[in-house]
Each structure stands twice: as structure tokens, then as C-alpha cells.
Image: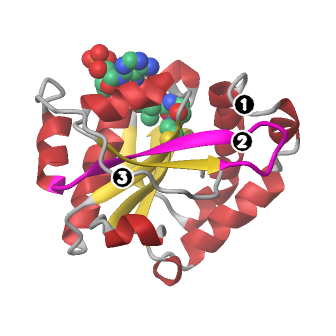
Amino acid sequence: MRSVQIRDAAPDDASAMGHLHVASWHESYAGLLPETLLADLSVAARVARWQTILDAPAARGVVAVLVADEGGGLVGLASCGSQRDATLRTAGFDGEISALYLRQAHQRRGLGRRLMRRMGAALMDRGLSTASVWVLRENVGARAFYERLGGEIVGEAIDPSGDVALVEVAYGWRDLSRLAKATSSVSADHSLTTHVANPRIATPT
Ligand SMILES: CC(C)(COP(=O)(O)OP(=O)(O)OC[C@H]1O[C@@H](n2cnc3c(N)ncnc32)[C@H](O)[C@@H]1OP(=O)(O)O)[C@@H](O)C(=O)NCCC(=O)NCCS
């Protein structure tokens, strides 16, 4: 298998990122999100959204946009920035992991851990010391991943707007230096604690 480089995304990655993002949603959320929602996903809209972010990340509070690059082909993407959720910000979470997606064939090879490590470092470099991430409640694989990296449940949100109410949970790290440790050695201990329940209207990023 070829080696995968984790690097900062460049503006001309937007097209590949949009395609990857939609493909990853289909792989990750089939059976978890309504079929109509997945069928309505637009690659063009995703490309445009990444282009806007990459052209002016700071304007949107984005601290880092990363890609996992295998010989020029993207197999993963991630982004983080300042906290968008007012309740979580008030609860002390100043940073946020806003997207993290790997193609299925590239999961469970340590790439997620490497991306989380880079994002934690980027947030700390920007003076942020805590972070959270939203994940679908039924996304057991991603939840196991965040729990393995020491994330604690710090919020819950329900989006009742579709035919099926979607429930998300937020994982938080109250000290990003602990995430740094957990991502350098995934065997680090962690505890899983419920702190607050947050109503939030949203679907995954
Ligand atoms: C969730 C995701 C980012 C994790 O990245 P990854 O590269 O697959 O995970 P890693 O190989 O770095 O895993 C690190 C550890 O987390 C845990 N872990 C990761 N995925 C897991 C899974 N599906 N089930 C149980 N534990 C898991 C394991 O302890 C793993 O260590 P191990 O492989 O030595 O046992 C990736 O699987 C992914 O992109 N999934 C689909 C999209 C998604 O759900 N994104 C999250 C949106 S909020």
C-alpha cells in the first residue's frame, strides 16, 4: 500500500475534496441518514463550499483544513476552527473539529488519529485549548474512535426537520494536550462522562 501524506489543503484541492466528501457521506451514512437526504447531496455544492473555505479560511473561523493525500489522490479530509455552537462555547469549548472523513478503504490505518493530532496541534497553535466534535448518535465506529482518543460526551442535539429525527452527540476534550497524548499513543486511558444536554438543530458537517 502506498504511503499517505497528511498536508494542509490548497485552494485547488476544493474539487477533489467536494467529490471525496460526498462519496464519504454515502459510504458512512447509508442506513444512518434518510436515503432522500443522501440522494440530494450535491457534489457541486460541496466543491463550492470547500472553495469558499479554502479561499478565505480565517473569515469563517477555520484554523486548519487538512487532506490525506495518497500519491496525489485524496483519501481523507478534515477541518477545524473556532467553536460555532454558542452553548458549547459557553460550556468552555473554544475549538471545534468541523469535518473528518476518510474513504472506507483507508479507515483503521491510523489516518484518523494522525488527522486529529494535526488538528489538535493547529488549534493549540492558535491559542485554543479545548475542542468538541458533533457525531451522529448511531455512528458507532466514529464514536468508538473519539472515545478511544479521550473524548467525553458533552452535548446532544436533535434535528426534527426531516422525516426521521436525527440525533447527534458532541464529544469534547477539555484539555487539548490530552488529545495530543492520546493521538501519539492510542492506548491512553480516558473516561466517558455525560455533562450537558444541548438542544441543537443540525445535520453532520
Ligand atoms: C471515524 C474515522 C475518522 C476514524 O479514522 P480511522 O483512520 O479509521 O481510525 P484510526 O485507524 O486512526 O483508529 C484509531 C483507533 O480508534 C478506534 N476506532 C477507529 N475506528 C473504529 C471503529 N470503526 N470501531 C471501533 N473502534 C474504532 C480504534 O481503537 C483504533 O485503534 P486500532 O485500529 O488500533 O484498534 C474514520 O473511520 C472515518 O472517516 N469514518 C467515516 C466518516 C465518519 O464517520 N467521520 C466522522 C464524522 S463525525
Q: Residue at x 30, y 31 (%)?
A: 147
Mark 3 and mark 1: Cα distance apart in space: 31 Å
Density class for disc 1 (Cα within 10 Å; few <14, some 14-19, many ≥20) is some
Q: Quick check: marks 1 and 2 in contact, CB under 8 Å? A: yes
Front residue of 75/199: it is 199
Q: Position of residue 55 (x, y in %)?
A: 58, 76
The kind of residue tagged 1 is His
Look at the numbered disc 3 and give the secondary structure of its residue.
Answer: loop
Name the residue carrying label 2. Answer: 22
Does mark 3 have its CB less than 8 Å from ligand 1?
Answer: no
Q: Which residues are magenta?
A: 159-176
Mark 1 and mark 2: Cα distance apart in space: 6 Å
**Would residue 167 be seen by someone viewing this image from the given angle?**
yes
Q: Residue at x 79, y 51 (%)?
A: 161
The kind of residue tagged 3 is Val
> Which label was assigned to residue 92?
none
Q: Quick check: marks 3 and 2 in contact, CB under 8 Å? A: no
Q: Position of residue 170 (x, y in %)?
A: 42, 47
Q: Is residue 148 above or below residue 179?
A: above
